[in-house]
Amino acid sequence: MSGAVRPDPAAARPVTGGGDIGRRVAERRARLGLSREELAARAGTSSGYVRYLEEYPADPGSGALLRIAAALDTTAAALHGGGAERPPGIGRAAAHPELLELGPGECRDLLATHGVGRISVATARGPAVIPVNYSVVDDAVVFRTAPDATPAAAAGTEVAFEVDHIDEALSEGWSVLVVGRAQRVTDPAAVRRLAAEAYSAPWPGGSRDLWLRIEPTSVTGRRIRAR
């Protein structure tokens, strides 16, 4: 119909290219599954303004930022990056929390396709837990590292791999634990496929061409929800 408002094609995915505030707005919007139109309606602004905020370096006024933050169930300080150097979970517990066990299907949905998780490895200096950029390919967790980096010690051993998310504003969160044996990926065709499908290069940079694959023997998870 002529003049109808069409849904924003960027409905639930973050964008790049904006300023720090815009990237945090886009990431938070994506986590909540909101389109730009939905966020704009919540905040009492236009979808064009949300688009501008996400895609261009912008310094919104305090009133506009407060409305955007409230619409995203967060705070203006969080969108400014306040607390970025602190560990997650510094807020208070909810008044009536529930601890729920997650089923295998929901655990795999939360693992999604990629992200940052933590792998436990045994080293000569003792146990270590290291964050890595990971992907999920054919139900296995895969990541790349350098042959002399700490995560490479996982090869040939049983490991635990964990991902989680904390919602500071709502005092809620979830965690998923994958246990399985880590193996080097050496087949050239498999390596090429993983490199082609990788969402991002490892955040630490450098040459990290060793791929490891964790075949899960168990996948479990828990969620904390405020009633």
Image (cartoon, grey):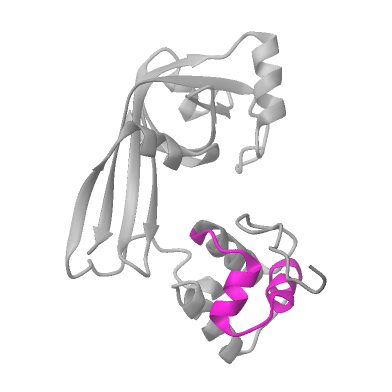
**Image quarter hosting the C terminus:** bottom left
Residue appearing at x 37%, y 66% in the figure: 168
Q: Residue furthest top?
A: 187
Residue placed furthest toward the front: 1
Q: Is residue 66 above or below residue 54?
A: below
Picture layout, residue 196 above or below residue 24 = above
Question: Could you tell me if residue 124 is visible in this image?
Answer: no
The question of residue 36 being in magenta is answered with yes
Furthest residue to the left? 96
96 left or right, relative to 136 = left
The reply to whether residue 36 is visible in this rendering is: yes
Q: Position of residue 36 (x, y in %)?
A: 64, 68
- In this view, the residue in front, 5 or 153, is 5
**Residue 183's x, y, as percent?**
47, 14
> Where 210 falls versus 50 (above or below)?
above
Q: Position of residue 206 (x, y in %)?
A: 67, 35
Instruction: Please report the residue visible at 44 percent of the width from the left and 73 percent of the height from the top.
Output: 73
Q: Picture quarter containing residue 51?
A: bottom right
The answer to whether residue 79 is left or right of residue 172 is: right
State the residue at coordinates (37%, 70%): 169
Q: Is residue 71 magenta?
A: no
Please provide percent x and percent y for residue 207.
68, 30
Start-end of magenta stretch: 32-56
Residue at the image position 53 percent from the left and 70 percent from the top: 81
Q: Considering the whole magenta stretch, tell me its main secondary structure.
A: helix
- Left or right: where does residue 163 sit relative to residue 29? left
Q: Specify whether 1 is left or right of 37.
A: right
- The tally of labels here is 0
Quadrant of the image for the N terminus?
Answer: bottom right
Q: Against 69, is 143 above or below?
A: above
The residue closer to the viewer here, 175 or 227, is 227
